[in-house]
Image (cartoon, rainbow, N blue to C red):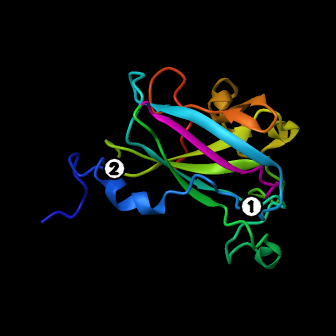
């Protein structure tokens, strides 16, 4: 007997039924400290069709670069008004939108500071497990020194960068395959 996933045991679209009560598109509550930002975009499949049943899960540090997690050595100084977590569905046109704060810089693999970024997990039909990406902000000078972004080939880095569309407004599309496929990380 095999207990491994088979191609027809993929994530979704049924998973949305269980996740809907957990949707959180306002990641930063009213009392959270930091620069408020809005991110919007679309999720596209391998042939460029919008994905109407995807869910993006967001994880991020607070404005000081501290995670709300016991393994962060600075967790005691974390902003108590900020959880750093959200779950964002796409609509019928594959569009998503969420609000949060711009995170602070967190230590990288060898202690060097990373550019402000969000961790993004993409859940959708056809995946056996979530696809993991990062979202960086186009107006951050620190992107040039980010140790993780530096691992991505220069011609593909733009797929991880949300473009500023005005004060506190960003646009970022997720492309699951094909031309301009978003870079996904394997942890």
Secondary element at tag 1? loop
Residue 29 quadrant: bottom right
* Direction from residue 99 to residue 74 in the image, left or right: right
Q: Report helix, strand or loop for mark 2.
A: loop
- 165 or 49: nearer the eye? 165
Compared to residue 85, the image places residue 44 above or below, namely: above
Q: Position of residue 168 (x, y in %)?
A: 78, 39
Residue 129 in picture, x, y percent from top left:
39, 52
From the image, which quarter does the C terminus lie in?
bottom right
How many numbered marks, from 0 up?
A: 2
Q: Earlier in the sequence, mark 1 or mark 2?
A: 1
Residue pushed farthest front? 30
Q: Are marks 1 and 2 in contact (CB under 8 Å)?
A: no
Point out residue 158 in the picture as x, y percentages from the top left corner.
67, 28
Can residue 146 be found in the magenta stretch? no
| Quarter that holds the N terminus | bottom left
Say which residue label 1 marks.
Answer: 30
Residue position marked by numbered label 2 in the rendering: 128
Q: Give the residue drawn at x 80%, y 38%.
A: 143
Where residue 10 sits: x, y (%)?
28, 49
Gap between marks 1 and 2, in whole Å? 36 Å
Q: Is residue 104 magenta?
A: yes
Q: Residue at x 68, y 78 (%)?
A: 70
Residue 19 relative to residue 170: left or right: left
At x 77%, y 32%, the residue is: 138
Q: Which residues are magenta?
A: 93-106
In terms of depth relative to the viewer, which is nearer, 148 or 102?
102
Categorize mark 1 by other alpha carbons within 10 Å: few (<14), some (14-19), many (20+): few
């Amino acid at each position: 007997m095999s207990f491994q996933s088979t191609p027809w045991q993929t994530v979704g679209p049924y998973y949305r039924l269980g996740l809907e009560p957990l949707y959180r598109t306002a990641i930063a509550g009213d009392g959270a400290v930091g620069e408020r930002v809005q991110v919007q975009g679309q999720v596209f499949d391998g042939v460029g069709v919008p994905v109407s049943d995807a869910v993006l899960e967001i994880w991020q540090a607070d404005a000081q670069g501290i995670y709300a997690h016991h393994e962060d050595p600075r967790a005691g100084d974390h902003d108590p008004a900020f959880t750093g977590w959200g779950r964002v569905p796409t609509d019928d046109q594959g569009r998503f939108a969420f609000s949060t704060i711009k995170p602070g810089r967190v230590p990288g693999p060898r202690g060097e500071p990373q550019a402000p970024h969000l961790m993004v997990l993409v859940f959708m039909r056809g995946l056996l497990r979530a696809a993991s990406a990062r979202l960086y902000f186009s107006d951050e000078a620190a992107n040039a020194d980010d140790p993780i972004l530096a691992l991505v080939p220069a011609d593909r880095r733009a797929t991880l960068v949300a473009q500023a569309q005005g004060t506190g407004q960003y646009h970022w599309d997720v492309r699951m395959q094909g031309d301009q496929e978003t870079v996904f990380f394997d942890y």
